[in-house]
Amino acid sequence: MKLNLLLCFLINISLLPDSKPSIRYCDFTTNDRSKYCYAKEILLAITHSPNQLAVDKSSNTLYFSFDMGQGDFVPAVFNMDNKKLTVLNGVRDAFALASDDSSNIYFGGNNGIYRYEKQSLKQLNIKNLDIWWLYIRNNIYFIKFPNLEAHYYKNMTVKELPELKGKVVHQFVLDKQGNVFFINGSGLYGVRRGRHRDIMLRDNPKFLGMATDNNGDVYVCSEDGIYVVSKMVIKVKKIVNVQGVLGLTFDKLNNIVYTNAYEIVRLVPMTRKRSLFSFV
């Protein structure tokens, strides 16, 4: 069944002036040796913070969900190139979002999962489920609410994810080798592909969100910064010391896009050139 999407302008999100100077000063230093620092580009100022983010890489369009103050999460669309902003109607309580390699966007709400492609919305055969988290990597992976158990959808069938069977999971992703990383109230964990024993990687700070970048590397965020998992069970390194990060994703150029309690921000990497800093 396909549902038509109604588009309308959002009135309680503020668009910021489109200013892209060729030279900026550093806002954040970084421990990433491939970059000198980051400039902070505020994309949107928002009253009720979004929780999960996804990007259509072909159009550099950001999708996010937010609470309009009525208790339901609503999906919105923001083109990061032309700054156009719209709201999508059609998914009830669209809390979860994800994108695939074909630039399709998936929404998870309290009545299952929907795929948005070619300006139309199709409900998948994953109904009567309340979706907490979505992740796309060959299969459709998701977490059910309220039990917070991890599952995947394949061949028209919903199955429990073996690596996370019996575990409480707040969010999870797969790296490029197929290893599973997840977070819950106890910390950040890793499970090697095809195995079932989880290994704690960090028990602090409290991790709030995670994502994989365009190269398949795993990133996690917390209220004190953004971290990268450089190797399985070996190193979890903070790369940006930025406060209040709730969720993150990556744009088509692999720049970090994150959300906090009141805005959506893109981090633009910089290199040092004489006494000023230039875009990478």
Image (cartoon, helix red, strand yellow):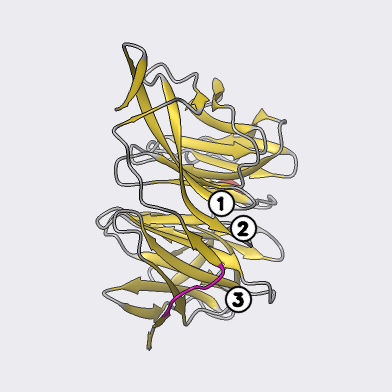
Q: Secondary structure at mark 3?
A: loop
Read off the residue under disc 3.
110
Residue 277 at what x, y percent from top left?
A: 35, 21
Q: Nearer the viewer, residue 46 or 149?
A: 46
Q: Secondary structure at mark 1?
A: strand
Q: Is residue 256 left or right of residue 28?
A: left
Residue 220, above or below 87: above
Single out the residue that lies furthest toward the right. Answer: 186
- Report crowding for label 1: few under 14, some 14 to 19, many 20 or more residues within 10 A (C-alpha): some
For marks 3 and 2, the one nearer the N-term is: 2
Q: Nearer the viewer, residue 109 or 33?
A: 33
Question: Residue 103 sits in which quadrant?
Answer: bottom left
Question: Residue 238 sits in which quadrant?
Answer: top right
Residue 189 at what x, y percent from top left?
A: 62, 36
Read off the residue under disc 2.
49
| Quadrant that contains the C terminus | top left
Read off the residue under disc 1.
263
Single out the residue that lies furthest toward the top. Answer: 274
Which amino acid type is marked by label 1?
Glu
